Image (spheres, grey):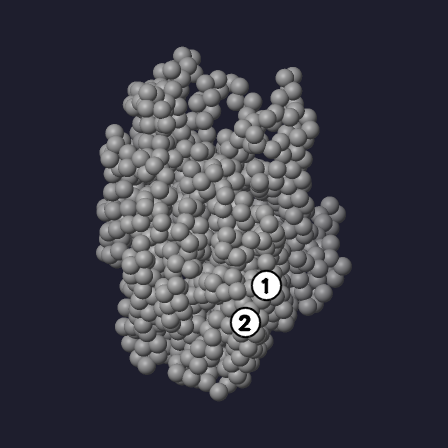
Amino acid sequence: MKPVNLGGTQFQQNVNKTSIICIGVGIVLAIAGMAMNQASILPAYLVGAMYVIGISVTALFFSALQFLVRAGWSASIRRIPEMLGWFAQFALIILLPILIFRNSFYHGIENIPSKAPYTNTPFFIARVIGYCLFWFWMHRYIIGNSIKQDSMPGDYAPTLKNYKRSAPFVLGYALTITFAAFDLMMALEPHWFSTIFGLYYFAGNFVSTISVITLLFISVYNSGELKGFISKEHMHDLGKLMFAFTIFWTYIHFSQYFLIWYSNLPEETFYYIDRTKNGWEILGWASLFIHFIVPFILLLRQDVKRNFTIVKAAAIIILIAHFIDLSWIIIPGYREHGIEHFDIIALMSAGGMVLFFMGLLLFFTAKRMNSISGIAHNDPFLQESIDLIS
Amino acid sequence: MSDSKNIAVLGNFKDPNKIMHAANKVRESGYTDFDIYTPYPIHGLDKAMGVKRSILPYISFAGAMFGLSNAVFLMWWTGAVDYKLNIGGKPFFSVQFGIPIMFELTVLLTGLATFVALWALCGLPKWYSDLQDDAGFKSAVDDTFVLSIFATDQRFSLETTTKFMNEIGADDVRLIEA
Amino acid sequence: MSVENVTQTGQGSSQEHLTSASYQNNPYPVPDSQREPLVLGNPSIHDVTEKIAGIIEGKANAKYWVAVLICASIAGIGFAAIGETVTTGIGVWGSNNTIGWAWDITNFVFWIGIGHAGTLISAILYLFRQKWRTAINRSAEAMTIFAVLCAGIFPVIHTGRPWFAYWLTPYPNQMQLWVNFRSPLVWDVFAVTTYLTVSALFWFIGLVPDLATIRNYVKGKTAKSLYTFFSFGWTGSMRAWHHYEIAYLILAGLSTPLVISVHTIVSMDFATSVLPGWHTTIFPPYFVAGAIFSGFAMVMTLLVIAREILGLKDYITLKHLENMNKIILATGMMVGYAYSMEFFIAWYSGNEYERTVFINRAFGEYWWAYWSMLSCNVLSPQIYWFKKARRNIPLMFVISIFVNIGMWFERFTIISTSLHHDFLPSSWSYYTPTMVEVGIFVGTIGLFLTLFLLFSKYLPVIAISEIKGIMPGSQPVHHHDEEHHH
């Protein structure tokens, strides 16, 4: 089959337009919020960074996962996460301010002698650079091979290589995203610890990434650029994944919350106590409501997963919920550093940063459309994906 | 014709495409009281036959709500009303510790409701069928698709229905009498 | 599968599903090894009936009855040991004040875990449209039910007075007491009974159409009337299939969170406590992954034997076994991830009790249990990175046994190492099982195998109607193709 160039299409223009709006609105909100409450600069930046890095890196994981399980259904939509994943290469640039101003971002994590062998600054910097290099490498190899397949009709060497490589890369993804969650988010509470925390960050990322993919899918479907390759069946499957993984996120968060609530140990229960008082409980309730209940009800029925309006609404709600969730984890971590109470200004700054970074992600995604085919046109399972019936 | 009564006209099919085609034809010609017996579910055949979507999910949902409300009531009433016991300083009732049992009872009652409703909607168990002695019908649980148009259908007449069955490609068209 | 695309009348969506002419014929065929057929030997639909119903109709040989006899005798030993426990009291066990939960709860969790693969295969793989599940789901579901039955024995006899087991249920009584809904052990009662009930319903619903097939196949009078009775008079009516498929989907959708909830609640028996080594937030998903892991290992152990003896190599193919080995590798990595998170966070927490327990776990008196667990669960499946190993039948049998052993040790490690050194050094203790406990455990293995042997002879070991439905040519081709091109 022939490559499909999405450069210059209506779809690319739409993504570009959205990205410009996001960046513009994001900058205005973030600057206004940060000007009104300077203490919100750090948490807002962290929320934005964790949000966009999580989604772009998980897009790489999504692609690798398709190779790992030899998925046929997704072959014709796989370029969407692969284009999103391009941004993961810039993770280090986004994290650079955090590396430089570590002591302002994280208070006291270095002052605990028993943890120092792990939490000291040089090791921390080395680790974060390591994660970023791994993600860079993951993009180069997994996505690189997927693209290489485009120019090699009939010779499946790159795809077969990816079958082999996807497993170690998925493993590496699991470890890097876990320790990134420990180092960049759990460290906000130097005394607190939770074994499930990495999985929790992953769960939120995965469902958000699927939501972004779904939104881009709906946009490209409506613009008609991939006519003949994609159908409502793919959206049905994406909808199922969204449904399943909002429940998964809920399950993971419930596991953490419930066990801490029940055992009521002072060394860990303060995490939730501080997040359910001084107004912060609003975010907790909001995240329960729009990260679980609303998407669950919206997506429960089979037929609604083929309804564009509903799926789109669910995807947007999940993305907002992920922002609320990250804000709930991160912003109260600054309660002794300028943001004592639930602060709508801080939330606004954080929302601005998320919009700004997501705008950048979309901008680079649109740019990527100029250089690679919009469809993995030599994928061995492309026909299977085109013929998909879900 | 004294004591024998027409039950149905049966025809066999072997090809899933042909039975699909036949089902559409039967529905289009206005028959409503007919059925197709197949060894495994054929995708889309129910729709081709014009079968209305099952109400089963609503019954399951009712079961779910029944289970959930029972669980909440049971834990709240026994713990916070009928016999208050302070155990480890835990609240007498709270949603948090109630979640496991709320979930389990919801699932249990949904499962039971679905099970009962399935057999009720299928009209089973029923250990007798007017068609049970027909050899083709017996092989419907093996490898044959059997189309059956019942005499109770308003459009049924022995000649036209038999002719119609032959036209839509049924093999071995036959009348079942009781 | 959506039904919309197959109707000729095309109610809305046949135009939706665009397949332009130029892409009709894939110029690059899929590499051979990637999509193997699910059933080998190209049997007809009738051949499937012959094959599976033939197992039931055929006469079992002497070897089979010897095997049943041996397994039943082992089960008998178990029942004798249970009798000894019940009549004398649980003092005949090695449990003591410090280690109050030992073999019994280890075995309970072990069996419950094994029971998870069946529901996973039948429900989760069904929802993910993994068609290869059809060859193995029936036997895996049977194992679920038998394993949960074995599991249920342990907490009941652990109560000491099993004839009062009904006290575990909330019912109005003279003492006006209710069960304590704040206790994870009560959640267990609800979870396990719900799981057993729903799995049994799911299994039975799946069996009904197949029992109808067998009803029409068997010749013996008693057999015929029994299969007739239990097939509920199933005729294969498409109107019934319509309800049936929806019910099956609902039960699959229901079983998926259920199976996860059961081991989650089992994990909460430990994790809601304040004991170092038990109280850790990753326990629920970690236990679920472990349960799937051990369940698949047990399915593998039995299927490798069953496909050989029952001659089902064309149905349970190397592809199926390879897929299961991949799942074993993946879930093995997941439990490995959980072990390392536990260890890392125990250190990272800076909590001296956490740290001590984990050092003690690896290097204390129970070091052998810990390292057995680690080498069986994390190291041994690593060989499955190689395709050759994933398709080597003797090897996969051995690995599956290793995993079974490793997962038993995992539960033993969790329970015993956290208990035997508690906060008060004067009450530290060590646990060794007595012969009675060993007898009960071995007995449950005998019971499990007896039930499985009986199942494999008297019930269809492969879901006949499901496998027929996925065979090539068994479903109509989509009419939208014809509409577009003719």
| Residue closer to the observer: B10 or C350 | C350
Residue A124 at what x, y percent from top left? 32, 58
| Residue closer to the observer: C57 or C201 | C201
Residue type at the position of mark 2: Ile
Residue C471 at what x, y percent from top left? 43, 59
Chain letter behind tag 1: A
Left or right: residue C8 versus residue C278 is right
Q: Residue at x 61, y 40 (%)?
A: B95
Residue C89 at what x, y percent from top left? 41, 14
Up/down of A201 relative to B76, above or below: below
| Residue closer to the observer: B44 or A143 | A143
Left or right: residue A3 versus residue C64 is right
Q: Residue at x 53, y 65 (%)?
A: A38
Q: Secondary structure at mark 1?
A: helix
Report the Cα–Cα distance between label 1 and label 2: 11 Å
Location of residue A70 by image quarter: bottom left
Location of residue C37 by image quarter: bottom left
Q: Which mark is residue A31?
A: 2
- Rate crowding at label 2 as few (under 14), some (14 to 19) or many (20 or more) other CA atoms within 10 Å: some
Residue type at the position of mark 1: Ile
Q: Secondary structure at mark 2?
A: helix
Left or right: residue B1 versus residue A325 is right
Up/down of C82 relative to A59, above or below: above
| Quadrant in which the C terminus of chain C appears | bottom right
Residue C174 at what x, y percent from top left? 65, 16
Residue A89 seen by the camera: yes
Up/down of C144 relative to C26, above or below: above
Location of residue C345 by image quarter: top left
Up/down of A349 relative to B55, above or below: below
Return the residue at label 1: A345
Q: Residue at x 36, y 49 (%)?
A: A111
